[in-house]
Image (cartoon, rainbow, N blue to C red):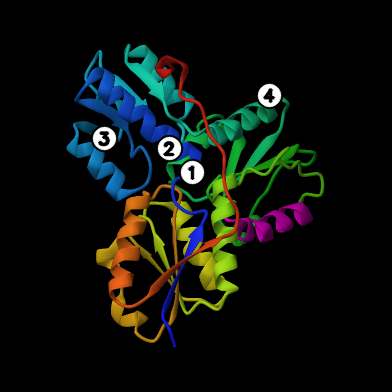
Amino acid sequence: MQRRLLIARPRGFCAGVVRAIDVVDRLLEREGAPLYVRKEIVHNRAVVEDFRSRGVVFVDELDQVPDGQTVVFSAHGISPEVRDEAERRGLHAVDATCPLVTKVHHEVIRLVREGFHIILIGHAGHDEVLGTMGEAPDRITLVTCLGDVAGLEFPPGARLAYATQTTLSIDETLGIVEALKERFPDLIEPRKSDICYATQNRQDAVKALVGKGLDHLLVVGSRTSSNSRRLCEVAENLGVPATLIDGAADIPIEDLAGCPRVGLTAGASAPEHLVQEVVAFMGDQGWLPEEVVVLKENVNFSLPSELMG
C-alpha cells in the first residue's frame, strides 16, 4: 500500500498570532534591540528562539524591564494590574493581545458591571486565563474540568454567566457547559462562542483527516501551546494516536512504520516552515504528501494604532 501524508488545511498561524509576531517585527525594525516582551509572545519554541536570537528579551514580570523601555504584552492578554504597573512605571507598552481574547475580556467586564458572577472554563495557570481572571478576581470562578462543576456553590439568587478560554476545544467544553446549565438553569451564555475561529477550524480539519482513515496524527506545536495539545486530543478522542512535535527531529519514525496513512497539522502558533520540514522528512521516508483542504481562512487583524503606517 502506498504511504500517504495527509496535510490539513487550515493549519498553523492564526490571525492573532500573525498580528502579535508583526508587532514584535515592526518594533525591532523601528526601535532595535533589546526589545522586551512580557511572557512568550506566542506559545511556540521556534518563534520565541528566533526572536531571542534577534535581541528580544522575554521576561516573566515587568520588574525585569528597565525604566523607560518598550515592553510588548503577549497575544494571550493581561490583567488590569499589569497594565497599571506599566503605566505607573512609565514604560512604553504595546499591546499584542489577540482581539478575540480582548473580546472575552470586554464581555467579562460588562457582565461583572451588570452584577454577574463569571464561571470561566479554562486551564489553571495558562497566560490567557490569568489575564482574564485578573479583570475581576473576586467575581470569577475557574472551572478546569467536568468534575469541578459539582463543587460550585453560589448564594441563592446569584446571577451567573460563563466564559471560556479561547483555545479550548468545543468538544472539551460541551460537557462542562451542559453540566453548568443543568445545575444553574438561568446561566447566561456568551453572545458568541468564545472559542476562537482558528481553534475550531483546526479541530474540524483534524476531524476531516480522521474521517479519511488515519493511522496516526502528527501535530506541529510546542507543549506550552494549549490549542496544539487540543488537536492531539481531538484525534485521540476519535481513536487515532497523535504525537505533538516541535519539528521534524521529534517525529517518532519507528512508531510510524506500520502507518500507511499519517495525518499532519499544526497549532495556531506553529510556523509553516516547521510543517514543510516535516513534509520533506516524511517524503524522504516514503510518505507521499497530499493536502486536504477543509476550508480557507481569510481573517486579518489590524496592528495596534501606534504601529500603523
**Residue at position x 77%, y 49% from top?**
184
Kindly indicate whether the residue at mark 2 contacts the one at mark 1 (C-beta within 8 angstroms).
yes
The quarter of the displayed image where residue 205 is located: bottom right
Q: Mark 4 is on which residue type?
A: Arg
Structural crowding at the residue carrying mark 2, measured as other residues with C-alpha within 10 Å and reported as few (<14), some (14–19) or many (≥20): some
Label located before the other in sequence (4 or 2): 2
Q: Mark 1 points at which residue?
A: 14
Residue 111 is situated, as x and y percent measured from the top left of the image, at 69, 30
Query: What element does badge 1 sit on?
Result: loop
Label located before the other in sequence (1 or 4): 1
Q: Name the residue under label 2.
A: 18
Query: What element does badge 3 sit on?
Result: strand
Mark in the foreground, 4 or 2: 2
The Cα–Cα distance between marks 3 and 4, rounded to whole angstroms, is: 34 Å
**Residue at position x 26%, y 35% from top?**
58
The Cα–Cα distance between marks 4 and 2, rounded to whole angstroms, is: 32 Å
| 28 shown above or below 278 | above
Kindly indicate whether the residue at mark 2 contacts the one at mark 4 (C-beta within 8 angstroms).
no
Instruction: Say whether residue 181 is magenta.
Output: yes
Query: What element does badge 4 sit on?
Result: helix
Residue nearest the viewer, comparing 104 with 252? 252
Q: Mark 1 is on which residue type?
A: Cys
Q: Name the residue under label 3.
A: 58
Label located before the other in sequence (3 or 2): 2
- What span is colored magenta in the figure? 169-183
The Cα–Cα distance between marks 1 and 4, rounded to whole angstroms, is: 31 Å
Residue 64 is situated, as x and y percent measured from the top left of the image, at 23, 27
